[in-house]
Structure formats: C-alpha cells, structure tokens
Image (spheres, grey):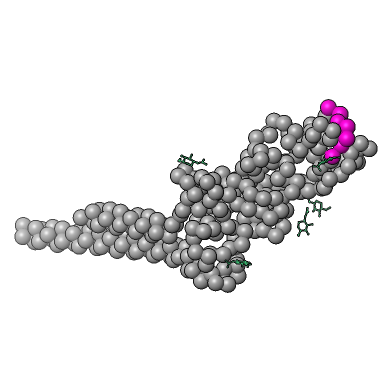
Amino acid sequence: MESIFLVTIFLSSIFIATDAYRSNSRTIQCSRGGPEIQSPFWVKFRQPHSCNASGFELICRENATTIRFPSYGDLVVKSILYNTRKLDLIDPKSCVHEVFLNLNLSLTPFHYYYSVKNYTYLNCSAPLSNSFTEIPCLSGRSFHVYTVESSLPVPGSCKKIKTVAIPFSYSPYISDNTFGLGLTWDLPGRERFTSKGHHHILSIDRGHGEAVLSIGIVIVALVALVSITIYRSRELQKLKREQKLEAHKLLADS
Ligand SMILES: *[C@@H]1O[C@H](CO)[C@@H](O)[C@H](O)[C@H]1NC(C)=O
Ligand SMILES: *[C@@H]1O[C@H](CO)[C@@H](O)[C@H](O)[C@H]1NC(C)=O
Ligand SMILES: *[C@@H]1O[C@H](CO)[C@@H](O)[C@H](O)[C@H]1NC(C)=O
Ligand SMILES: *[C@@H]1O[C@H](CO)[C@@H](O)[C@H](O)[C@H]1NC(C)=O
Ligand SMILES: *[C@@H]1O[C@H](CO)[C@@H](O)[C@H](O)[C@H]1NC(C)=O
C-alpha cells in the first residue's frame, strides 16, 4: 500500500520536473542537428528583440549557426555546452591563427575557454630556422608568418605584427580549423537585460522558478516519506501492543 503511494509520488515528481524543464528550455535550432539555442543566446530575426543580450546574438545563415565578432567577422557555432559554458566555434576560412590574431574579445562577454599565453606574430621576409613552423594560411610566397614566444627577440628579417594572448601557438599537428576556438562566457548580469528586456528577465526568473519547483517536489517527497515511516512505526507499535495484550489475555484465561 505505502510502497504504491511512494512509487506514485516518485513518478509524478519526475513527470512534473521533466515537464517543467521542457517548458522552460524552449530551444530553437538553425537546422536539424544544429546546436540548441537557449538563454543567454538568442537568434536574430527569429526571436523577439526583447532578449537583446549584446554579444549573445546568433544568426542562422543557410543551415549554419553563426556568431558575429566586430573584430573578426562571422564564425560558425559548432556546439554550445550550457552546463560548462563552452562555445565551440569553427572558422569558415579554416585559419584559426588568423582568428587568434584578429579576434578581440575585450568588449564581448566571451574569453577563451583554455588558459592563454602571450605569443608574438612575426611577419618575416625570409624563412626562419627549421625549429619554427610557419602558419601556412597566413604566409605567402614572399613572406612567412610565425607565432613565437613573446620573450623571443625579433629576428632581423622579421617584423612584429602583434603580441596577443592566445590559447595555442601554431602547430602543424593541431591545424584543424576547430582546435582552440573554444570560448566561455560570463553569466550575463541583469543590467544587460533591463532595457526593453522584461521578457528576458522573466525567462531568467523561470529558471529560478524551476529550481524552486524541484526543491518543492523533493520536500514534498521527503515529507511523504517521513510521514509514511512514522505511520508505519506507529502501526507496528500498535500491533505489538495488541499482541502483548492478547498474550496477557491468553495468560489470564489459562
Ligand atoms: C540592443 O542593445 C544595444 C546595446 O545596448 C543597442 O545599441 C541596440 O540598439 C539594441 N537593439 C535593439 C533591437 O533593441
Ligand atoms: C541545408 O539542409 C538541407 C536539408 O538537410 C539541404 O538540403 C541543403 O542543401 C542544406 N543547405 C546548405 C546550404 O547546406
Ligand atoms: C582590443 O580592444 C580594446 C578596446 O577596443 C583595446 O583597448 C585593445 O587594445 C584591443 N586589444 C588588442 C590586442 O588589439
Ligand atoms: C600579455 O602581455 C600583456 C602586456 O604586456 C600583459 O598585460 C598580460 O597580462 C599578458 N598576458 C598573459 C596571459 O601573460
Ligand atoms: C606580411 O607582410 C606582407 C608584405 O611584407 C604583407 O603583404 C602581408 O599582408 C603581411 N601579413 C600579415 C599577416 O601581416
């Protein structure tokens, strides 16, 4: 009897929790199989402008999910991991080090997911020794571009382009066009949403509501469990008392 009650409570709490979760994460996608887009990201032209969280605006272009950086241009969003706050990007031009060289994240909510180190980009009129590998996608016939430790003195044949804090120096072994383009974001503060952003605040609050609801369900389940346990032990005591009484009666009768 009690076990059926317990199972019912458990099943309904699971049902309510998943339902609450589903209705809260109304995700949209640019294409089937594309990354799921939910707060703090939003899609231009598809979602109301009330969620105007600067920096988190995505654009569906053909089947691709893209994000625009004023300092670089458009990058393709490969995946968004909301629990670890990781945004994986792909450079459509397949030149990650061109992205590293130009991408300036300072006015965006993003920074590199991996820890960064200062590297200097060099533009050399002659190739450096074999211990340096030029970046093919940035080099030409008459010039050779390298990433070197920023402490290295600039060789005579080279001009320093820029020193930038990036996650990786160039390596021919990790030259695929996704490696290193992992970003993470700071949680948007409420102030980002205050102008015209009431709908968005509501959707953030719903996240809170969901947590409160889940906690509520757990508390109800716990209370039910405790009451059942108390009820059971009382019933047991009652049964014992009755048995004792009966035993006494039997003794008295005999
Ligand atoms: C979004 O916010 C930015 C910066 O606060 C503002 O310049 C822009 O006009 C806003 N766009 C819309 C559609 O509200
Ligand atoms: C987008 O996806 C559809 C269906 O999967 C496909 O037919 C179409 O060629 C794709 N378009 C582009 C530009 O990739
Ligand atoms: C990035 O942009 C900020 C603000 O515009 C600027 O102060 C900073 O020097 C830039 N950083 C690089 C590495 O260009
Ligand atoms: C890179 O160099 C700049 C300027 O010297 C410095 O402010 C910054 O802290 C350095 N960044 C790293 C990650 O070492
Ligand atoms: C390197 O220098 C050459 C000419 O000296 C120039 O055409 C090229 O754009 C430079 N590359 C970079 C990445 O600055």
For the N terminus, give its image quadrant.
bottom left
Q: Vertical placement of 103 versus 238: above or below?
A: above
Q: How far across and down, in percent of the image, does residue 148 sit?
A: 82, 39
**Could you tell me what secondary structure mostly forms the magenta stretch?**
loop
The mark total stands at 0
Q: Furthest-top residue in view? A: 130
Residue beneath the point at 60% across and 52% down: 67
Residue toward you, 217 or 136: 136
Segment tinted magenta in the rendering? 123-130
Q: How far across and down, in percent of the image, does residue 230 sit?
A: 29, 62
Quarter where residue 14 is shown: bottom left
Q: In this view, does 43 lie to the left or right of 107?
A: left
Q: How far across and down, in percent of the image, does residue 153 sit?
A: 91, 41
Q: Vertical placement of 11 versus 135: above or below?
A: below
Work out whether residue 208 can be spotted.
no
Q: Furthest-left residue in view? A: 253
For the C terminus, give its image quadrant.
bottom left
Would you say residue 1 sits in the magenta stretch?
A: no
Residue beneath the point at 49% across and 49% down: 30
Q: In this view, does 167 lie to the left or right of 243?
A: right
Would you say residue 128 sits in the magenta stretch?
A: yes
Q: In this view, does 40 lie to the left or right of 127?
A: left
Residue toward you, 17 or 1: 17
Work out whether residue 120 can be spotted.
yes
Residue beneath the point at 62% across and 59% down: 55
Q: How far across and down, in percent of the image, does residue 39 sit?
A: 52, 59
Residue beneath the point at 12% across and 59% down: 246
Q: In this view, does 83 lie to the left or right of 102?
A: left
Residue toward you, 209 or 176: 176
